[in-house]
Amino acid sequence: MEKNKTDWERAVEFHGHSCPGLAIGFRAAKVAQEKMGLTFSANEEFVCVTENDACGVDAIQLLTGCSIGKGNLIYRGTGKMAYSFFNRKTGESLRIVVKLQTKEMSREERQEYILNAPAEEIFNFRKPAFSLPEEARIFQSVTCESCGESAPENKIRLQDGKKVCLDCFKDYCRGW
């Protein structure tokens, strides 16, 4: 990616197309950077907990340096258009939640609105109701005694006296 491109152009290039969803993540990342003084996270200085797996997460990765592989982008599948940012150095945190927009707009109009409207019109801000996730850990690999593939020890279950991976594990449930 070229250095002289705008952040938005870089986000569109990274994601593959422009859309309102990408704009949401873009603005959320920019707002977190402004309100919390976040910069690009080279390691795990900053953490983002995303509650959705939608387009905006790509912009958050690009702008904040938070990624699943680095362990500082955590997916919490509530389906909400919400992002919680944490600064490990200062202990500061901020939850950014998209406000429901009922005004009829075209896709292009909505994208422009998200990119340019005051942040307070687009988002609600509060403290996250959950704590800062612990730093990423490296676990020992264990070989599944059913399929022979290895998985980290925290993802292994005991079943009929054997160590099995989550794919081979047959959960027991009698209701609820």
Image (cartoon, rainbow, N blue to C red):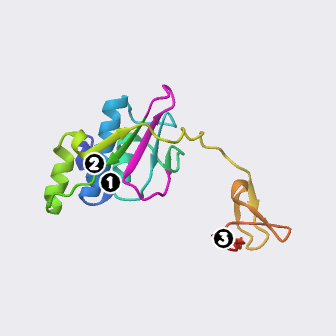
Q: Give the mark, 3 or 2, whose residue is nearer the N terminus.
A: 2
Residue 10's label in the rendered image is 2
- Quarter of the view holding residue 166: bottom right
Q: Which mark is residue 167?
A: 3
Q: Is residue 127 visible?
A: yes
Tell me if residue 1 can be seen.
no
Determine contact: label 2, label 1, CB under 8 Å: yes
Give the CA distance from mark 2 to mark 1. 6 Å
Q: Position of residue 132 (x, y in %)?
A: 54, 38
Q: Along the horizontal axis of the image, is 77 left or right of 135?
A: left
Q: Amino acid at mark 2?
A: Arg
- Range of residues picked out in magenta: 75-93
Q: Residue at x 14, y 62 (%)?
A: 106
Q: Nearer the viewer, residue 128 or 167?
A: 128
Q: State the separation of the CA atoms marked 3 and 2.
A: 37 Å
> Dot 1, crowdedness within 10 Å: few (<14), some or many (≥20)?
some
Q: In the rendered view, would you say 53 is above or below 10?
A: below
At mark 1, the secondary structure is helix
Q: Residue 157, which numbered label?
A: none
Q: Disc 3 marks which amino acid?
A: Asp
Specify which label sits upstream in the sequence, 3 or 1: 1
What number is the disc on residue 14? 1
Element type where label 3 sits in the image: loop
Mark 3 vs mark 1, CA separation in Å: 32 Å
Residue type at tag 1: Phe
Q: Is residue 30 above or below residue 54?
A: above
Whether 61 is drawn above or below 162: the answer is: above
SS under mark 2: helix
